[in-house]
Amino acid sequence: MSVTEPAPVAPPSAHEGILRRQSLRESAARTYARSLPIVPVRARGLTIEGADGRRYLDCLSGAGTLALGHNHPVVLEAIRKVIDSGAPLHVLDLATPVKDAFTTELFATLPRQFADNARIQFCGPAGTDAVEAAFKLVRAATGRSGLLTFTGAYHGMTAGALEASGGATDVRVTRLPFPQDYRCPFGTGGEHGATLAARWTEHLLDDRKGGVPAPAGMIVEPVQGEGGVNPAPDAWLRRMRRITEERSIPLIADEVQTGVGRTGAFWAVEHSGIVPDVMVLSKAIGGSLPLAVIVYRAELDLWQPGAHAGTFRGNQLAMAAGAATLAYVRENQLADRAAVLGARMLASLRELRAHHPGIGDVRGRGLMIGLELVDPESAPLPAEAGDPAPAPPPDPALALAVQQECLRRGLIVELGGRHGAVVRLLPPLTLTDEQATAVVDRLADALAAATRSPQRRTTAGPTT
């Protein structure tokens, strides 16, 4: 079936019973299942087929996990090879040929200045555990307890990671302004807004009465994903590196979602040229299976044996799949491909914005793209004469309606941002030109339908 054709409509089937049982048995904390009521049974590349026979273009990609899409042949072959070899699948943190091959391939992709003096810690299988490990590491190495993080951040769902994330309400970390063009906290945007954010950070750290605990580290996402697809300006990120170096504060780069070519460079820190002290890695490094690590400067390797452990830190299948994925992305220059195709999709979506006042902003880097949807009719006026007009308020109801209309057209997208008003695209790096066009076309149709719908403001609640 061509990707430009609408998804076939199938009669009700057993998948409805599966969805009903899920809603009865699973916890109220489930998330994706609410907005994406599908039952995947087969998948390949960009395409998912549901139990009802409908096909979908998957621009969620396991929240960025599937760098090569679903069931890529090199990933399946790597997994089969380990299974057929008779190798143990559970090894705690013992050395194995599979782990050695993964570590060698991973270090080959890292910035050379970083990799030449690095150590790796295998963590529990989720990225949030790697974030916790990074916090433990820098606290042990510095003897300090404070942490610096940024507004809009997202680092995971465990206690320490949540505390460092933007939605936290009871925190022991110092929150710093993350620069944005569209909703600049200083009302200026652009280079000037980023300069003000950096200047405020320096002032706060050097103010003896600023109330900032001595920081053990600063954690930053090179592109905020869940926070609304906000790329960190390169010059600002270089200044954060300089600020932390001058004050002996380890810099932690959270590359859980931005890594493995997603942003148009193999690692997103390469856009700015910075070398962090710690990198937090997960999602795509496991080739679709659970895997998380931190890589860090050898000088920080001061913690004691067992300081961070986990029963499932030796996932052999994930290491094999991850090594195959890393090698494939590197050998086929998929990061460069993501940069080119992502720029093309951003251009198309910005053209779409000219015809849809509900699109407030289009932004992203590589194949990490976001559209912030707004209510232009409720746009506030400038506070004073000469002030720039504030951005219109976000419109989460419209965003949810667009997501639902996308699903009806066979396109899976995710929502993010502070108000859930950013439509996010995270397609696999193997996306073809034809598929990219189909994604944009279906999104444009969904936006037009959602904008026309008089019911859209009453459909903002989650579905089961």
Image (spheres, rainbow, N blue to C red):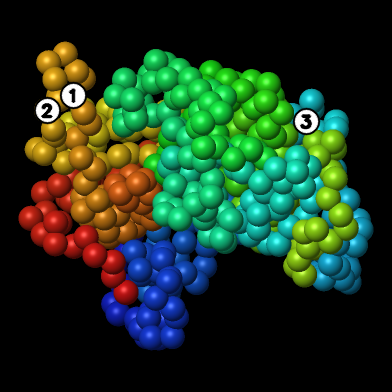
| Residue marked by disc 1 | 389
Q: Nearer the viewer, residue 310 or 352?
A: 310
Earlier-in-chain disc, 1 versus 2: 2
Whole-percent x, y for residue 68 in the image = 60, 48
The residue located at (55%, 37%) in the rendering is: 212
Residue type at tag 1: Ala
Q: Tell whether 50 sits left or right of 264.
A: left
* Quarter of the C terminus within the rendering: bottom left
Left or right: 21 in relation to 107: left
Please tell me whether mark 3 sits on a helix, a strand or a loop: helix
Look at 83% across and 50% down and name the residue there: 303
The relative height of residue 204 versus residue 14 in the rendered view (above or below) is above
Figure quadrant of residue 49: bottom left
Q: Position of residue 416 (x, y in %)?
A: 38, 49
- Evaluate whether residue 190 shows in this view: yes
Instruction: State how far apart marks 1 and 3 are (Cα).
Output: 43 Å
Q: Is 226 in front, or is 104? A: 226
Q: Is residue 327 visible?
A: no
Mark 1: which secondary structure?
loop
Q: CA distance from mark 1 to mark 2?
A: 6 Å
Q: Label 2 crowding class (10 Å Cα cut-off): few <14, some 14-19, many 20+?
A: few
- Amino acid type indicated by mark 3: Phe
Q: Contact, CB < 8 Å: mark 1 with mark 2? A: yes
| Residue linked to disc 2 | 381
Residue 86, quarter of picture = bottom right
Residue assigned mark 3: 114
> Residue 397 at what x, y percent from top left?
21, 53
Marks 1, 3: nearer the viewer: 1
Q: Pick whichever, 71 or 108, lies toward us.
A: 108
Quadrant (top left, top right, bottom left, bottom right) of the N terminus: bottom left
Q: Nearer the viewer, mark 3 or mark 2?
A: 2
